[in-house]
Each structure stands twice: as C-alpha cells, then as structure tokens.
Amino acid sequence: MDIRVLKYFLAVAREGNITKAAESLHITQPTLSRQMMELEEDMGTELFIRGRRQILLTDSGILFQQRAKEIVQLYEKVRREMAEQNDLLGGTISIGCVETIASNLLPEVLTEFSKQHPMVKYELYSADGNDIREKIDRGDIDMGILVEPVEAAKYDYICLPFHEQWGIVMKTDDPLAQKEAILTADIQDKPLIVPRRTIVIEEIAKWLGMERERLNIVASHNLLTNSLLLVERGFGYTICVKGAFDIRKKDNICFLPFFPERITGHVLAWKKNQVFSNATAKFLQYIKEKY
C-alpha cells in the first residue's frame, strides 16, 4: 500500500461513487475499482458496501477512513518539512491554541515573525488542551499554547506572560449575578458544566472542598460555545476562564470570578526531543527571546 492508494480510497469515500471518484482523480473507473479490491484484500476485510448507485463504508471502512486521513495529513506535513530544508525559511509552522486570553499572542508574534520571514506560512488549530496534546503527540502539529499544568516528562515548554482568572458563567437575571464574586459555597449544589479535562475537574473539586464524585456535573465541554447556549437556557452554570468567555460575550449571560481568586498560567509546549524544520526552530527561538 502507498499514499496514492490511500488518496484513492479517501476520494471514493468522499464521493460515494466509483465513477465520480475516478473522474476527480483523473484515472479510469476499472483501475480505481481494482485498486479498491486489492486494498480490501490487503486489509483482510470489506471496506465498502457496494450498491447500484452508491458506495457506503462498512464499520471497518469508517475506521480505515479516519486512519487514512491521519496518514495522508502526516505525509503532506513531512513533504512540506523536507521542502523547507531546501528553502530555508519558506514553509509551514503548525500551532495549536486553547481559546483563552493567550489567543492574543498569535496575532502579535505571527505578524512580527512574518515581517522577518515573509515566506513562512501558518496552520492554526483551535481546540482544548486534550486535543492539542494529542495532535502534538501524533506529530500533526509542531507546538501548542496550553493552560497549565503540563506534563514535564513529556513536553518542553516556554512559560508565557498570560494569566487567566477562573469563574462562573450564568444568566444575567440569576440571583447570583448580583454578586461581585462567587464563593465556592454559592455553587456547591448547582448544576455545573465543566471543562472535560480530568485534571481541571479535580482542581475544581478542590476549590469547592468536595470529592469529585459529589460534584453536580450535568455536562462537560471541550470548547465553550455550546455550553454557553446551555447556560442561556438555564441548564446549568459553566465554569471557565474569563478570556474564553470574553471572546464570546452575550448580553443575557455574564462572568463572575471566584473568590478567593483562582488564577492559572499558560505555556507554549512541544514534544521533547522533537526535531523541527528550519522555520519552526527559528520561530521557537524567536519566542524564547521575546518571552
């Protein structure tokens, strides 16, 4: 099997039709059909459910589609990095970033770095810390901006000058919204919508002076958008950092900080012993010198 066959498979999965896929790939329909049958034989399982007009994926085919996308994306990333070796600082730097106040770092540093190296391009990936860590671990992205803490044994990192304030998002007509800050006792029995990271949930339990199992958690989220819709409907109270709320402000909900104040920092992290392209290595050095 080679990358070409994986791209053929992804085209068939996308089009749901051998003829249309063959046209998009500029190859003949019999050639593509033969390649797919050989692929199934190589995998030892059926990947397609072949109908008269449409081709669907089997359960194995759906799993194979996911893995094929990852392999093709990684292959394209390696190709770009190899090209960069011959073109110095012409290439692509891939960066993941949590949606917090630290998002403000990227417009500033990318603009400044691009003035020095205009041939460099960027891939930006927004997600929560779990997704960004997985992307770093798989090599899908070069580095990520994360909320502390990070696993020191797995990552090298630079501490960034961004600190976030934790608090609660609620409806503006909620009785608690009249307060200046939220005491832990105010929400111990309230339905909570929390970040999905286990380490964050455990920290919230400590703040509230409760065992994790006793928290009234009604939902968890990776990014804040959908949880804010639940808050608007009175489904619960969302625990988050202020920066994530500030980029999604609405008139009918509000953010109140915890008291005592709960503050967390940010880091730019990458996998230990990672060998970077010239452009990425230069970018990291730029960040280290700046911060």
Image (spheres, rainbow, N blue to C red):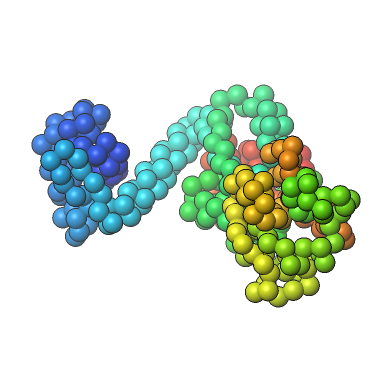
Vertical order, 110 against 61 (above or below): above
Residue 131 makes an appearance in the image: yes
Is residue 8 rendered to the left or right of residue 201? left
Please, is residue 267 above or below residue 113 in the view?
A: below
x, y percent for residue 47: 22, 52
x 74%, y 74%: residue: 210
Q: Nearer the viewer, residue 165 or 268?
A: 165
Numbered disc total = 0
* Residue 52 in picture, x, y percent from top left: 12, 41
Q: Quadrant of residue 116?
A: top right
x 21%, y 37%: residue: 17
Residue 131: x %, y % from top left: 55, 53
Residue in the foreground of this view, choosing between 148 and 197: 197
From the viewer's perspective, is 94 left or right of 269? left
Out of 66 and 115, give the one closest to the viewer: 66
Tell me if residue 145 comes above or below residue 261 in the rendering. above
- Residue farthest to the left? 30
Residue at 82% of width from left, 53% of height from top? 175
The answer to whether one can see residue 271 in this image is no
Task: Out of 238 and 114, give the one closest to the viewer.
Answer: 238
Which residue is found at the position 78% from the left and 72% from the top? 209
- The image shows residue 274 at horizontal and vertical percentages of 55, 52
Location of the C terminus (image quadrant):
top right
